[in-house]
Amino acid sequence: MSSLNFNIFNIIILAGIIQGLIFGFFLLAPKRYSKGNLYLAMTVFSLTLNNIMYLPFTLGFDKIYPALDAIYLPFELLIIPSFFFFVNHYLDYRNERKTKLLLLFPFLFYSLFYIFDTFNLLVFNGNLMPKNFKNNFIDFEEFFTLSYSFVLIFLILRKIKIYEKENSIYAIEKVKAKTKWLKDILFLGYVICLFWLGIIVSIGKNFSTDLYYILWICISFLIYWISYTASSNYALLIERKNIRNEILLGNQKTESKQKKHLDDGNTIFSQFESYIQKSYTNPNLSIDITSKELGISNNYLSQIISQKSIKFNSYLNSFRIEAAKKMLNDKAFSKYTIVAIGLEAGFNSKASFYRAFKAQTGTTPLEYRKSTEEQVSFS
């Protein structure tokens, strides 16, 4: 065992593998299981198993147990398809069965080849397949995997662009998923693929295969990043959808009152009040959008609300803060995070929510929730 190659790089790779396995099983736990978490777990497991396939090589086990060279499955062909399924689900697109089979076919096809190769090596000592054919096939598989990954990343980015275009206008009925973090991960995926291509070209020029260490470490980093970023954003989206459903149910009860208020409104200011009351959950709402909806100019609306000694942003945030306070006071919303509540109240970030809430109430949302819980416990 003294010939094993333990170093800082192998420790990082091993830590990434342990992290991936723990997190993957955590996502599949009964209390957390969902289709989105299933696809996310598939992505994390694919990244993890891909590094596991190379772990004997990095540690030097292949020199002690040569038979380990015969055990291999191309899990790199599962990484991008699994993430494709996750993104589709995250953006509320349906994963068709035909699409799933098409994207998983390369992994299944090459897996059959490697299973046959393992059987050939262990049972027939490699005599059933010419060595040149096997080497050429493996080289082709590596180039195919790279090309396949590039194409799928492009298709995912294209789908994200379509989603952003379709949801460019705010709608109360639908929670718009955040997409910047997706594009950041895909950009890193592109960088890793380009580096992988560089390694293949370098090896062709007789450069050291130690460059693969950087690739495996990048994959370990990707495991950490996806584990935290994807799971937290997906959980936040689910929370926001649940909160939105409860808000919509509450709005249905007061819809008739709001309609009556709109019908009775004989002044522009009453129409303005009604519109803000109906639209304050839109994080992009501005005085420009409001004036266009009311059919008047921006300057004219500014004059009208200034006569009432009202500032547009302060007035708008007052509705949002009241909505947030109502949710923070309600036991039905105690299971949701403060960030999700703030976003569903209409704020576009945690920072803007905390800043506006403290400016109006003199306390933070967290302190407000704690004080409310303490009042309930004492009563």
Image: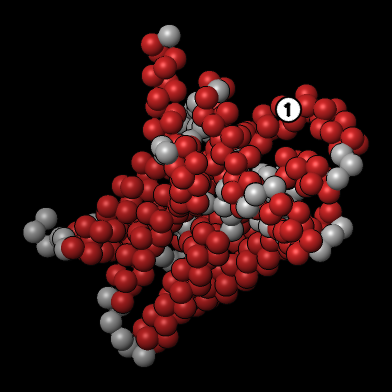
| Disc 1 target residue | 249
Evaluate whether residue 82 shows in this view.
Answer: no
State left or right for residue 270 relative to residue 239.
right
Q: Amino acid at mark 1?
A: Leu
**Residue found 23% across the figure and 61% down from its top:** 10
Label count reads 1
For label 1, the SS is: helix
Q: Quadrant of the N terminus?
A: bottom left
Nearer to me, 307 or 316: 307
Residue drawn at point x = 33 percent, y = 51 percent: 17
**Which quadrant would residue 289 be assigned to in this image?**
bottom right
- Is 94 left, or right, of 296 in this rendering? left
Q: Is residue 256 visible?
A: yes
The answer to whether residue 190 is above or below residue 43 is below
Residue 145, above or below 236: below
Residue placed furthest toward the bottom: 205
Colour approach in the figure: secondary structure
> Where's residue 103, x and y in %?
64, 58
Quarter-of-image position of residue 298 = bottom right
Query: The C terminus is located in which quarter?
Result: top left
Note whether 176 is above or below 35 in the view shown. Answer: below
The location of residue 357, given as percent across then percent down, is: 49, 42
How many neighbours does mark 1 have within 10 angstroms: few (below 14), some (14-19), or many (20 or more)?
few
Name the residue at the top extreme: 379
Q: Position of residue 260 (x, y in %)?
A: 88, 31
Q: Is residue 119 above or below residue 375?
A: below
| Residue at (79, 61) in percent of width and height | 300
Q: Is residue 267 left or right of residue 163?
A: right
Q: Residue at x 59, y 58 (%)?
A: 179
> How far across and down, in percent of the image, does residue 26 sit?
42, 36
- Tell me if 154 is positioned left or right of 111 in this view: right
